[in-house]
């Protein structure tokens, strides 16, 4: 035998208040939604019917209740039984002669949300020439329907909803609160909404709503200032006809965290859906804050977010294309303005350029990058030096920039966010672009090798220097290079750096993973780091003439420590100990005397 589910209305109300709706304040939105939908239904057959919604807070009614009057289509007694007493049954049904997309409401739970703030709801409604009907619902699940008495009968079609507040919900019924909420949710509605005598609607949206309409940029800037609290860097009109969407993207005037999601202000059929809706723009467009109105996007059941479906995906892609087009137009017609924008929001543009060829070309032409020959765009760098030679990390660039410049090697700093990835992607959109990652070992090929007689004379010194640094796994060599002021350079190949990372991970790993890391280390023996002493440096030449083995060791250790510090290399515990001992040892030799 089939049975019907039983619904505990108290449990449903608790579910709505704690899990579906974010705040009891949505009751004003739901009352406005029902009123506007009723007016829409009536005007489909009576185009000249009045379009008014009047809200009377308890201070105006005088009996502690809140009333909402509308000039909508009203309901017959059978419709009251069917639609107001059935959860999930929307009054905006096709059987009433209207397709669902013309209405704000979709789920048939709007009136039920009023139980978040009310213990009793009374609905007095009249449809055309039908008698006035009174429906009364209570939060414990009971309801009653009867014909209204003479004192409650309406002379015109429409509905009056009366809420009897719960004892703990008084703060939601004050006149200032109700006025603020009516203005928040309904400021763009195409009907006359008033709280008491105070109008809360402000007319149509301030952005263009028809193709080809003029854009009042100054007016939109004022709108952003008043509504969002900032004067935008620029405004970008938005339109997606298949979603019935119009609006504007406000370009933020200050940097923001790319990982943060401030959200966007979204209206559905001119009723506010959410102040912080997510998912409207691609993630890379974090520098834009949108205010839009859409007719075809679907809300979630709570009407506080957008439902993720194929249409929302299409809208997101289209809006991204429109913002990208604005950037391209800036590059073409106002490069100075583009440079100002990039100084503020370069991360977003570079993030887009990772997968968008047009944006990559824009970055190539306009974004200035740090190099060891000055600040240049990649296009300017190519025109001057041909090959784009780059350091992949900030540390590598700091270690090698000055020395590379002295060897006439121009190097781009690819250590900032996305820069290396963008450089490495350039040849995929322009095959004429040549790139090369700078290896520390590349510099040694440009250093001058000493003549055989000098090398022979330095062998005793090199032997002593190698003994001093052998325990640190470092090879000591002597070369001649510029700048002369640099006494020593510490060079680590990528394989050596990888081996150091393996060793550090091995120290922290358990037995199983330690074995795996040992196998990796054994399969790829690293090149040893090099301490390259500069024979052109006067101090180094003096050090190479020392005959005291202890003093040679102290001097080489000190040069090693200085090279680590100047090259911004990580300092290990053994390196720190060496720095300390060499400093104290040299100080002790410099200050002779008895204790």
Image: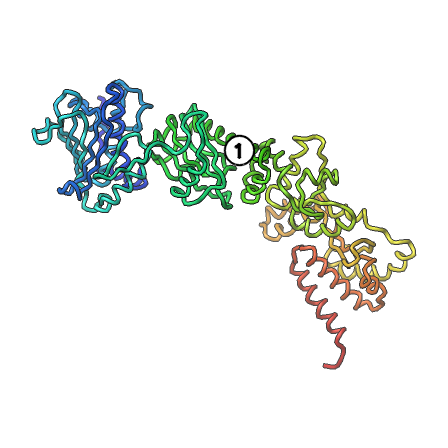
589 versus 30 height, above or below: below
Identify the residue shown where x is 71% and y is 61%. Answer: 562
Count of numbered badges drawn on the protein:
1
Task: Give neighbour class at mark 1: few <14, some 14-19, many 20+ (Cα, 10 Å).
Answer: some
Give left or right: position of 63 versus 93: left
Q: Residue at x 89, y 60 (%)?
A: 457
Image position of 506 (left or right of 486): left
Quadrant assignment, res 331? top right
Question: In this rendering, would 430 be left or right of 284?
Answer: right
Location of residue 560 (image quadrant):
bottom right
Compared with residue 528, is residue 136 higher up or lower down, i.e. above or below? above
Q: Position of residue 103 (x, y in %)?
A: 30, 26
- Which residue position is annotated with label 1? 326
Quadrant in the rendering for residue 84: top left
Query: In this picture, is 216 found above or below 46?
Result: below
Q: Where is the C terminus found, in terms of image quarters?
A: bottom right
Residue 286 seen in render: no
């Amino acid at each position: 035998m089939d049975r019907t589910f039983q619904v505990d209305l108290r449990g449903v109300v608790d579910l709505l208040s704690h899990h579906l709706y974010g705040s009891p304040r949505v009751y004003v939105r739901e009352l406005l939604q029902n009123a506007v939908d009723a007016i829409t239904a009536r005007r489909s057959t009576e185009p000249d019917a009045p379009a008014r919604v009047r809200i009377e807070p308890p201070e105006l009614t005088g009996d502690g209740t809140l009333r909402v009057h509308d000039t909508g289509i009203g309901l017959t007694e059978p419709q009251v039984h069917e639609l107001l007493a059935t959860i999930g049954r929307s009054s905006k049904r096709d059987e009433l002669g209207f397709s669902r997309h013309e209405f704000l409401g979709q789920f048939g739970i709007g009136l039920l949300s009023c139980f978040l703030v009310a213990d009793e709801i009374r609905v007095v409604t009249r449809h055309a020439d039908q008698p006035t009907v009174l429906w009364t619902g209570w939060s414990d699940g009971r309801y009653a329907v009867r014909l209204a008495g003479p004192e409650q009968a309406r002379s015109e079609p429409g509905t009056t909803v009366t809420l009897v507040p719960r004892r703990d919900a008084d703060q939601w019924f004050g006149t200032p609160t109700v006025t603020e909420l009516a203005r928040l949710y309904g400021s763009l509605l195409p009907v006359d909404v008033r709280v008491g005598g105070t109008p809360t609607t402000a007319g149509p949206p301030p952005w263009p709503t028809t193709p080809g309409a003029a854009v009042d940029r100054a007016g939109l800037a004022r709108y952003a200032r008043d509504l969002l609290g900032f004067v935008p860097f620029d405004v970008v009109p938005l339109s997606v006809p298949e979603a019935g969407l119009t609006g504007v993207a406000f370009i933020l005037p200050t940097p923001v965290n790319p990982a943060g999601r401030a959200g966007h202000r979204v209206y559905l059929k001119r009723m506010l859906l959410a102040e912080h809706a997510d998912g409207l723009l691609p993630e890379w467009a974090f520098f834009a804050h949108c205010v839009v109105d859409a007719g075809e996007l679907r809300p979630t059941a709570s009407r506080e977010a957008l439902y993720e479906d194929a249409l929302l995906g299409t809208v997101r892609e289209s809006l991204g294309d429109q913002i990208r087009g604005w950037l391209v137009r800036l590059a073409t017609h106002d490069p100075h303005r583009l440079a100002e924008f990039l100084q503020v929001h370069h991360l977003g543009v570079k993030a887009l350029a990772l997968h968008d060829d047009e944006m990559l070309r824009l970055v190539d032409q306009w974004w200035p990058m740090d190099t060891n020959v000055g600040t240049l765009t990649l296009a300017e760098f190519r025109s001057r030096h041909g090959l784009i030679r780059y350091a992949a990390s900030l540390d590598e660039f700091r270690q090698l920039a000055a020395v590379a410049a002295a060897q006439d090697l121009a190097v781009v700093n690819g250590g900032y966010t996305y820069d290396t990835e963008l450089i490495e992607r350039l040849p995929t959109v322009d095959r004429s672009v040549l790139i090369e990652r700078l290896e520390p070992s590349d510099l040694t090929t440009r250093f001058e090798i000493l003549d055989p007689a000098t090398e022979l004379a330095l062998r005793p010194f090199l032997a002593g220097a190698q003994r001093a640094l052998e325990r640190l796994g470092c090879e000591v060599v002597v070369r001649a290079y510029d700048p002369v002021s640099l006494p020593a350079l510490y060079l680590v190949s990528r394989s050596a750096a990888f081996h150091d990372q393996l060793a550090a991970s091995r120290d922290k790993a358990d037995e199983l993973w330690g074995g795996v890391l040992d196998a990796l280390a054994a399969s790829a023996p690293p090149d040893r780091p090099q301490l390259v002493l500069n024979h052109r440096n006067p101090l180094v030449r003096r050090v190479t003439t020392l005959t005291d083995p202890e003093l040679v060791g102290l001097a080489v250790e000190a040069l090693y420590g200085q090279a680590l510090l100047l090259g911004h290399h990580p300092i290990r515990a053994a390196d720190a100990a060496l720095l300390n001992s060499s400093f104290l040892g040299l100080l002790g030799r410099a200050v002779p005397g008895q204790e």
